[in-house]
Image (tube, rainbow, N blue to C red):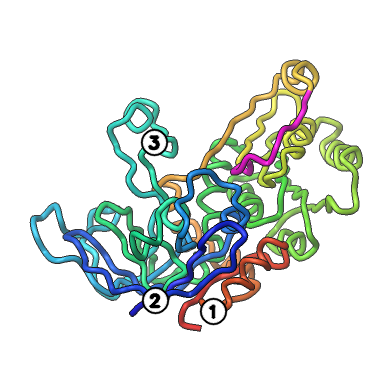
Amino acid sequence: MISAVVMTAPDAPLEVRAFERPELEPGGVLLRTLGSEVCGTDAHLWKGQLAGVPYPIIPGHVSVGQVAELGPAGATADVARDVSGAPLQVGQIVTFLDVYGTCGRCWYCTVGHATTRCPSRKVYGVTLSADDGLLGGWSEYIYLRPGVHVVPLPAELDWRAFLAGGCGMPTALHAVTLGEIAFGDTVVVQGAGPVGLCAAVLAQLRGAGSVIVVGGPEVRLDAATRFGADAVIDIGSTTPQERLAAVRDATQGRGADVTIEATGAPGAVPEGMRLTRDAGRYVVVGQYTDAGDATFNPHLDLNQKHLEIRGCWGSDVGHVYRSVQVMARYGRQFPWTELISREYGLDSAQAALEDVAAQRVVKALIVPAR
């Protein structure tokens, strides 16, 4: 039997349940879980803030595992392969895109080139039920259905280092790419969680002249400073007017060239519009759940400013692949594992979830072998 954590319903205590070892289909892969992140999405799931979640679920949508078993060999098309087309091998250390079932045939997939909006998409650890098997990372094993996009980790990238970025890195990579940061730009990042911290790192790698992180609490702002932010602004001890003045002072009165919102707080959006200079770019990536409304002045905050606003939803397999390459290449410059505050076993998953929800940690991992 295989042990896995189950979230039975919103606000309900997590449970550890036993599951049968799955029978693999041709093209299927069974991973022995090395680790799985605990992120803000999991806190949203626990609080019932996402629609369409088929409770009970096994949480954990970004994970790393070792290939333990491959489905039976059939036709060539049935062989489990990684994103480069190479056949997977037992013993490989891999991650995978949590999005499963993107159809490749709808308007969004074919014409819009926006697979994150495919209506057929499902997400491991989020919209796949525990009643259907080991389809989440807070488990001793994860079953990858045929067609899941698998990305091997290179030897120079420790699996813990990759999970230190977790879903935050590909999400931030998507947002920073949309921001089109140029050499010498001043970049403001709203939010000091994993997405915001990764965005601050990637902004540096894109050539930003200055990176300012606005957020909290102190443990996360300290991490932002260690990972290269030129300045941090604590939202707990400043007003919106003081934050605007600080950013204006740092930019000769103009505001940021590019601002990236990674907070999830609706009120951060109009503030971010005002932190951005006239004719600048504002990328909104943090509004993953419907946390309510926010008010802005269309004339003063948008039109007169000639402001460009870009919404950013999730990530695709290209973002995951590129994240792996970036983290492997720049591991000496950015000691990723320092972002990991604590590791938890399956029987401590409730504590991990509560610590993340309360922002007591920067990054928490579920490590089943603990």
Q: Where residue 89 sits: x, y (%)?
A: 23, 69
Q: What residue type is labelled 1?
A: Asp
Dominant SS of magenta comes to loop
The foreground one among 296 and 47 is 47
The foreground one among 274 and 205 is 274
Which dot, 1 or 2, sits closer to the camera? 2
Q: What residue type is labelled 2?
A: Ala
Going by the image, does 208 lie left or right of 92? right
**Residue shown at 86% from the left, 32% from the top:** 253
Q: Residue 347 carries which label?
A: 1
In the depicted structure, whether residue 278 falls above or below residue 341 = above
N-term mark: 3 or 2: 2
Q: Can residue 158 be seen in this snapshot?
A: no
Q: Can residue 210 be seen in this snapshot?
A: yes
Q: Distance between the residues labelled 1 and 3?
A: 35 Å
In the depicted structure, whether residue 160 falls above or below residue 97 = below
Q: Are marks 1 and 2 in contact (CB under 8 Å)?
A: no
Q: Quadrant of the N terminus?
A: bottom left
Q: Residue 18 carries which label?
A: 2
Q: Where residue 120 sits: x, y (%)?
A: 35, 39
Which dot, 3 or 2, sits closer to the camera? 2
Q: Which segment did they paint magenta?
A: 286-296
Question: SS of the residue at dot 1?
Answer: helix
The residue that disc 3 covers is 118
Based on the displayed image, in which of its 4 quarters is residue 73 positioned? bottom left
**Residue shown at 77% from the left, 52% from the top:** 215
Going by the image, does 230 lie left or right of 96? right
Which dot, 1 or 3, sits closer to the camera? 1
N-term mark: 1 or 3: 3
Q: Distance between the residues labelled 3 and 2?
A: 33 Å
Q: Do the residues labelled 3 and 2 touch (CB within 8 Å)?
A: no
Q: How far apart are marks 1 and 2 (CA)?
A: 13 Å
